[in-house]
Image (cartoon, rainbow, N blue to C red):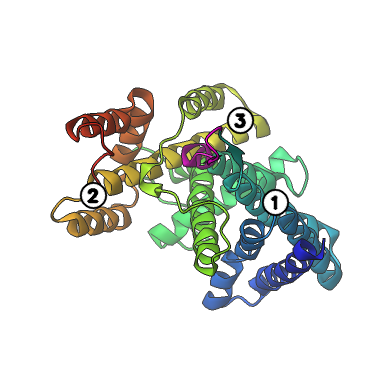
Amino acid sequence: MTRYIAPGILAGLASAVLISLIGVGTGLAVMLVLLAPIPVIIVTLAFDHRSGLVAGAIGALAITAVHGSLFGGMGYFLTTALPAWWLGYLALLGRPMPDGTTEWYPLGRLLAWIAGTGALTYFGSSVLTGFDFEAYTRNTREMAEAVLRIQTDTPEDVPLPDFGDLPGEDIAARLAGALPIFAAQGFTVILTFYIWMGARIVSASGRLLRPWPQISRTIMPREALYTLFAVSLAAIFLDGFTGVLATALTGAFLMAFALQGLAAIHEMSLGRSGRGFILVLTYVLVLLSQGLVFLPLIMFGLTDTALGIRERMRANLTGRNGGGPPLS
């Protein structure tokens, strides 16, 4: 029993220390705060999913005790520890096959769960202060206005400028309504990074239970596509927090399909001359285009899942190799 309790306690304390640095306010402190879920993921992947639960509970208790705030401890557990534990738990799911091998949880399904978890993390952080939709709307509107004032260099005592035919106040309202999309997309990216980084650290220690997968072959199942269309349709018609959740899920799944598109570029460029240039150019465009490059990546990800583009390419390559493994 101690083989998973002791590591969980240490990881929970480490995670609590990292999250507590949020009050320092420096750039380095913010970077360390963002790493708070990684100790939970590491013990989950390296020891047992029960270690991850222990880490989350210990971290929440430590934050509650030090800061004297049950709200702070619960907020840490729901938005930091629980998502990290859940994704680590899924990554190690496997079932024995008749030939004695293990079929591990597919990366495509894990990516879909990362998207869902990212949306739920944003939703959970939004309702922690209570299901007060008016307060939520007011807070998001203030954040949207603050962003527009920074971008337009407008002082607080001056009305927002118009954007063409649209008043600045209308733009702020629309930006506030779209906040769940962008926030959930950010959570999806950072959760993907967390599970990758945690798995890399555990793999380097030799404790990762599953073999390192071919990440570039990640393809989400068609259920993810159906979910995206369903929640997108719901987001149009639903109001209140239900609409917020549907909007967040839409943004998260769109980002997941964009990440699948990135994975496809990695796979399809394998063995080709100039692969390094292609990958560098892709990521430079992602950074410099302010997200516009994600649009074609999303479209490819959607089409890839719907039509099985890469699965067909692999089948064709297998046929050309006389039934051997696909070229890479």
Q: Which residue is mark 1?
A: 82
- Closer to the chain start, of discs 2 and 3, is 3
Q: Is residue 294 left or right of residue 136?
A: left
Earlier-in-chain disc, 1 versus 2? 1
Q: Are circles 2 and 3 on residues that touch, CB within 8 Å?
A: no
Q: Disc count in the image? A: 3
Q: Is residue 68 above or below residue 145?
A: below
From the top left corner, tell me how far across and down residue 178 is, in percent. 50, 40
Q: Per the image, is 38 magenta?
A: no
Seen at 52% across and 50% down, the residue is 144
Residue that carries the numbered disc 3 in the rendered image: 243
Mark nearest the camera among 2 and 3 is 2
Residue 324 in picture, x, y percent from top left: 26, 37
Secondary structure at numbered mark 3: helix
Residue 270, numbered circle? 2
Q: Nearer the viewer, residue 66 or 48?
A: 48
What crowding class fits label 3: few (fewer than 14 Cα within 10 Å), some (14-19), or many (20 or more)? some
Left or right: where does residue 73 sit relative to residue 188?
Answer: right
Using the rendered view, name the quadrant where residue 100 is placed. top right
Q: CA distance from mark 1 to mark 2?
A: 36 Å
Expressed as whole percent of the image width and height from the top left, the position of residue 158 reads 48, 58
The magenta stretch is 98-112
Q: Are marks 1 and 2 in contact (CB under 8 Å)?
A: no
